[in-house]
Image (tube, rainbow, N blue to C red):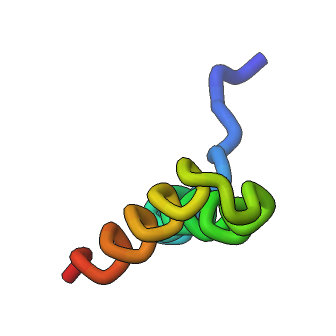
Amino acid sequence: MSDTTAAMPATPVAGRKRYQKMVPWILLGAAGLLLPLLDDAYIGVIAQRAFIYWILSVP
């Protein structure tokens, strides 16, 4: 018997990091798309404006 180990396939670390950077934007986009469901309620209008300002303030 030999003690050789099989080489593990390399994982694409760069691709995983790219997806990790995209997750917050996807969640923000989903939240932004769901905000109009609050209709014209006061909290809905405030939340929509906060979402827009938050997105516009990101460099």
Measured as percent of width and height from the top left, residue 17 is found at: 45, 61
Q: Nearer the viewer, residue 19 or 6?
A: 19
Image vertical order of residue 8 relative to residue 49, above or below? above
Measured as percent of width and height from the top left, residue 31 is found at: 64, 58
Measured as percent of width and height from the top left, residue 56 is found at: 31, 82
In this rendering, the count of numbered labels is 0
Image vertical order of residue 1 relative to residue 32, above or below? above
Q: Residue at x 68, y 64 (%)?
A: 40
Q: Residue at x 61, y 67 (%)?
A: 32
Direction from residue 6 to residue 20 in the image, left or right: left
In the rendered image, the quadrant that contains the N terminus is: top right
Q: Residue at x 55, y 48 (%)?
A: 43
Q: Nearer the viewer, residue 30 or 17?
A: 30
Q: Residue at x 38, y 62 (%)?
A: 50
Measured as percent of width and height from the top left, residue 25 is found at: 51, 67
Q: Nearer the viewer, residue 45 or 14?
A: 45
In the rendered image, the quadrant that contains the C terminus is: bottom left
Q: Can you tell which quarter of the image residue 5 is in?
A: top right
Direction from residue 34 to residue 14 in the image, left or right: left
Q: Nearer the viewer, residue 50 or 31?
A: 50
Tell me if I can see residue 20 in this picture: no
Image vertical order of residue 49 relative to residue 6, above or below? below
